[in-house]
Image (tube, rainbow, N blue to C red):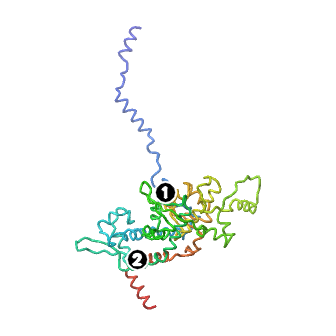
Amino acid sequence: MALLRLLSRTTAIPSKPHHILSSSSATAAAFFSTSFLITKIPKKFRKKRKKKESPRTKSIQTQPNLIPHFENILHRDAYFRFFTKTKEFLSKQREQVLLLDDAGKLHQQLGFPRGRKVLKSILRHPLIFQTYRHSDGKMWFGFSDLMDDLLREEREIEAKSELQRVDVVRKLLMMSVNKRIPLSKIYHNRLLFGISEDFRDKIANYPNYFRVTVEDDGKRILELVNWDDSLAVSALEKEFMADEEKVKKAFRFPVKHGRKLELELEDERKLNLLNTLPLVSPYSDGSKLDLWTLEAEKYRVGIIHEFLSLTLEKRAYIHNVVEFKEEFSLTKHTYQMLLKQPRTFYLAGTQMNWCVFLKDGYGGDGELVSKDPQVVFNEKLYKYADMQESEMGCRIEQERNE
């Protein structure tokens, strides 16, 4: 037995080194490898994930609800952005000229894309702007002779419309809380209402209407001096007297009711009509209304309607509306409020910068029903701004033949 134990020890099979085991296991793994199987979908067959659209570009309206002529107006605004902003900025400069090197740094003030050369935008409007080399050897740009003539024509229109613009400002003050608005807000939105650049200087000519006070922080406030009942009539009230049925259908404030009532459409319409009328005048004191009541919502809808009716083009961008938020007792839910009134308002543009249109102000062809002289002039200005020199020569020749 001892002999057998000795033999088993001497004839024991030696164990394999670790590196030999590793190589053999690797060989086995290679033999049974599944690398030949396609575990990933090739790129050309992968579904491309749509990038989440930015609020800067995402349309506020869905495709079925788009109204092309309203959207086209905003496209026109974007196309003439450089022209309109540069016209305003250049008009305030001394001698109405600007050094080209300085203009290249003013992309925000002049409305051209950041990183682009301003000269490219200037050359898009050859009948409006012109460049020249000064005696100092530097390039400058300013208005053309044609544009100088057009600006004189615009000043004449402003002079003739001054009393009308004064009434617009009076109505804005009459709608506001405490009948006062910071003068800077009216100035920032002056183009919306056709108010002239020098309106702040002309206020002194109307002491029976306006008074300017200066607060502790230096802010100048425009205040209403006298209330005028003849001006405290909204466009909606005037329309109600002319076409009562049209105004009844303008807004919708549905009554919440249970399904158990099983109302027919006509009965539901009559019930909703009781909830809709009477409307609340925008010239009443909305600050005294409870914030989330039906009367308060009617008041805010009426304020927006009257605000838009006072504008030249019966429309305003969100930043125009929001600037008067405190004065008109508006809430942060203005967007949702307007969405609920699609018969009267149309929201266009992008989620970042949308515009609200007053539908009744436009015909079916997208043209304004009533055009202010300033609007007619602006349309003529856009035609010249979009015209090349060769087209101008043909137009002059055509006018001579006529």
Q: Residue at x 31, y 69 (%)?
A: 98
**Nearer the observer, 373 or 280:** 280
Q: Which residue is mark 2?
A: 151
Q: Residue at x 38, y 9 (%)?
A: 3
- Kindly state the secondary structure of the residue where label 2 is placed: helix
Q: Residue furthest bottom?
A: 401
Task: Specify whether 291 is left or right of 181.
Answer: right
CA gap between label 1 and label 2 equals 37 Å
Image height of 249 relative to 41, above or below? below
Locate the N terminus and report the quarter of the image it occupies. Answer: top left
Question: Whole-percent x and y of residue 363?
Answer: 59, 74
**Nearer the observer, 384 or 251:** 251
**Nearer the observer, 3 or 321:** 321
- Residue 279 sits in which quadrant? bottom right
Task: Specify whether 145 is left or right of 208.
Answer: left
- Kindly state the secondary structure of the residue where label 1 is placed: loop
Task: Specify whether 263 is left or right of 224.
Answer: right
Dot 1 surroundings within 10 Å: few (below 14), some, or many (20 or more)?
few
Q: Which residue is mark 1?
A: 55
Dot 2 surroundings within 10 Å: few (below 14), some, or many (20 or more)?
some
Question: Whole-percent x and y of residue 286?
Answer: 60, 57
